[in-house]
Amino acid sequence: MRSMAVAKVPAKLSPAAEDLQAWLGVMKDRNPSKELIAAKWKSSRNLPWLLAALAVLPTKDPLHKELADEASRLPKNSPAGVSLRWHMTRSAVESASPADVLPLVRKALQQPWPAWAETALRKEGRAHASTLHDWSTLLGSRIVRLSEYGGDWGGADDLPETTAKRYGRNPLLLDPVVTEQLNFQFPLHLWEALIGSPDLPPALRMDLAHSAWTRAVLLQNWGSESRLKGYLDPQVQAAIPKDLHGLHPTIREFRTVQVLMAFPGLSPLAEGGMGRANDGWAPLSEAVWFGTNWWCLQPKKERNPAAEVPAFLGPADVSTCESEWGKLRAFSSSRHWFGRVVTAYAETHKDDPTVPQSLHRFVRITRNAECHDKELSELSRRAFRMLHKHYPDSPWAKKTPVHY
């Protein structure tokens, strides 16, 4: 005999459970009903709906003053204390005049915040900074999460040991918008001014100095090159010829390329986040497997729409930056430039004892290279042949069995 299935009637929720269910629905809804939230607050007057109302209702809403007064009466150890303080701060910033935003942000940052809140406040402060000094004091961002290839793999507590040793356990790092602004909107003289600011964490200052020094060399701005050299990693400083500017142009370019080839981490572009290596910070002299070695400027780079031009950058700064980028584009592929310089110099300076190592090094860095094309392959082959033809018994020829 067949039995009939009886549909189960859902258990009736208690009023408290229904209220919680409604609250959860509102808080996860991307477009929650403001009318529902206002009605729930008026009828319940409880903490969850106070939080929901402060999070969703705009500061111009008639209920906002009532909500703010209620929040101010709650004890500091309230379970929703941080969230309420955040929404009160956010509301104050949103309703403030542009000139008052930065002081509000600075005052708010005197209090402890979760990483996401501090990062948001710093971003808001930078957007309202009217001077480079104001902007520099808010330059870094806290780590909210660590991600790779679109997936999350941890938070600040999961920092790779090399990164924690370099920047600290709870570091201030550069976010993508800041690096976009620095790389494509700041002229070299503002890089210099920023690096000289006492507000920068030492590790970030050195990182930016490496990019700025590389820019100065490519732009042949020898005054900036000389001033920036003192901020560089001592290992890099030791590799730079003492009178780089005073050398003959051909020799100077070759010596510059030698320095840059020895340090894969040197680039005219600042790196955001943990740096050029996907698995944590890496020394400048280390070629990383999954990350950036030297530089390759793609012909058409899509700019980050969030990277608005900072207010303190004037028309002259923008024009200067555009002019500098006109010169930097001549070095869009570091490896192509290295190859042209090294092979041309080797043709005319066969007695230079540093040539064999430079030929070897260039051939090696053309393996699995970004911006690889037929020209780079030909330069690699040419350097390989020169090395084995003119220096067949050198250790560098023995270390270079193939070209790429």
Image (cartoon, grey):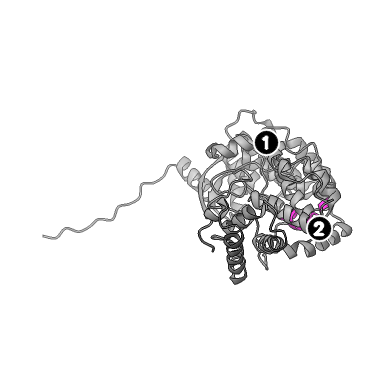
Give yes or no for contact between labels 1 and 2 (Cβ–Cβ under 8 Å). no
Residue 251 located within the stretch drawn in magenta: no
- Magenta region, residue range: 180-189
Say which amino acid is labelled 2: Pro
Residue at the right extreme? 316
Q: Give the side of residue 11 with respect to residue 208, left or right.
A: left
What is the crowding at mark 2: few (fewer than 14 residues within 10 Å), some, or many (at least 20)? Answer: few
Residue under pointer 1: 70
Residue at the bottom extreme? 374
Q: Is residue 316 above or below residue 56?
A: below
Q: Is residue 118 above or below residue 384?
A: above
Residue under pointer 2: 249
Single out the mark in the foreground, 1 or 2.
2
Q: Is residue 234 above or below residue 328?
A: above
- Front in this rendered view, residue 137 or 43: 137
Residue 220 in the image: state x and y as whole percent.
82, 56
Is residue 150 visible to us here? no
Say which amino acid is labelled 1: Glu
Residue 185 located within the stretch drawn in magenta: yes
Residue 279 in the image: state x and y as whole percent.
53, 46
SS under mark 1 = helix
Is residue 54 visible to us here? yes
Q: Residue at x 60, y 57 (%)?
A: 391
SS under mark 2 = helix
Q: Residue at x 51, y 48 (%)?
A: 152
Q: Quadrant of the N terminus?
A: bottom left
Which quadrant of the structure image shows residue 366?
bottom right
Q: Residue at x 57, y 40 (%)?
A: 48
